Amino acid sequence: MLAKRKKEKIFRQLNSLNGLIDFLSNDYLGLATNETLFSKTFQLLLNEGIASSGSGGSRLLSGNHKLYEQLEPLLALFYKANSALVFNSGYDANMGFFSSVPQRGDLIFYDEFVHASIREGIRMSNAKSYSFSHNDLNSLKDKVDINLDRNENSERAIYVVTESVFSMDGDIPDLKAFVNYTKENGYHLIVDEAHAVGVLGANGEGLISELGLELDVFARTVTFGKGFGCHGAAILGSQDLRDYLINFAKSFIYTTALTPHTLATIITSHSFLQELSEEPKIKLKENIEFFKNQIRAQKVDQHFISSHTAIQCCVIPGTKKVKLVSKKLMDKGFSIKAILAPTVPEGQERLRICLHSFNSKEEIGLLIKLLSSYI
């Protein structure tokens, strides 16, 4: 299989991108390198008298140290949820949820573009699953209608899965319409907010909170390695869901707990974002608008997937061509990578451009000018 990947020019390798202008990372507000946040995290550890580099075990053994007791109530309050359970990553959270919560006889309907962690979790569950067309509520309704007839079971639960901001497209579903549909029919809606939290909402609570839908979804996945600039994730939902995951989610039960430093960073980043001025978020919005104006001015907007978020994707079909354009941009000092199949469908290869509050208009303008000459 490795030989096949090399032959098809889709072999993955680890490369250093130090010194390049960042249009690649998910650190939308620059918190991952914020010195004030770093110092506040260190001060929290000092104040708590914590001088430990590791947790020493899983949370059900020795790893449930006192910062978890601070963090999870804080997260529940911040996101206006009934409870929160912290996982080591968004991947672990989705794997743990979908592999344990849906049961045999249940049905899962998921957007065709959901993250790989959701797909893998679903694959490990005993429920039957069906994809629906991207952001298409009518497609979801059709899939439900067809498959309800095939799977008669009055005891079954039905789960609908989507994201608030899609990681490889940057677009957003009509979450209010999805909520209305699932509530009317008694279905369970699960929303992955990985690329919305930290950026959307009054204080970075995500799109669900921005729309006031916190109590209308069965579960939310929030992650901290993107807009919050640190690491880890949490599942938000009812207390019963939290208790269930503690007892049955293998990716929670059988893994070493996060370090005190990681938890301190998550705690600090949430309070820090509330204290932070609106300037970084305003600057990010301005950069998104400027970027969209520039792609129109350079007449390359037809190559881009419509998005009003920090994720802007330029579709350049063909592995060879998109990798060549990426290399040319990196040679000019821009950190941008080609996204290839199987991460995206064949023929939909693309450059995934992430905008940040710290990108300058000069950098954005030059990037689009170069891009227009390469595609």
Image: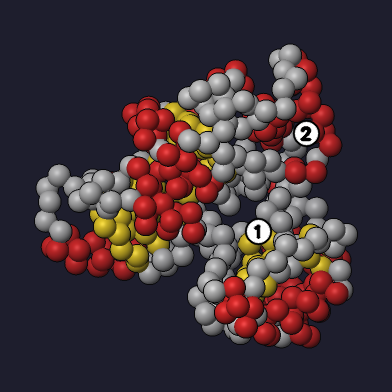
Q: In the rendered view of the protein, which quadrant contains the N terminus? A: bottom right
* Element at label 1: loop
Q: Position of residue 209 (x, y in %)?
A: 50, 41
Q: Amino acid at mark 1?
A: Ala
**Visible in this render: residue 214?**
no
Q: Relative to 107, does residue 318 appear above or below in the rendering?
A: below
**Visible in this render: residue 35?**
yes
* Residue tagged 2: 37
Which residue sits at x=31%, y=68%?
139
Q: Amino acid at mark 2?
A: Leu
Whether residues under marks 2 and 1 lie with C-beta atoms below 8 angstroms apart, the answer is no
- Please name whichever residue, 191 or 344, is drawn nearer the observer in this view of the structure: 344
- Please name whichever residue, 17 or 141, is drawn nearer the observer in this view of the structure: 17
Instruction: Locate residue 266: give its quadrant.
Output: top right
Q: Position of residue 101 (x, y in %)?
A: 33, 42
Which residue sits at x=54%, y=82%?
347
- Please name whichever residue, 220 or 46, is drawn nearer the observer in this view of the structure: 46
Q: Position of residue 134 (x, y in %)?
A: 42, 67
Q: Relative to 130, does residue 199 appear above or below in the rendering?
A: above
* Residue tagged 1: 310
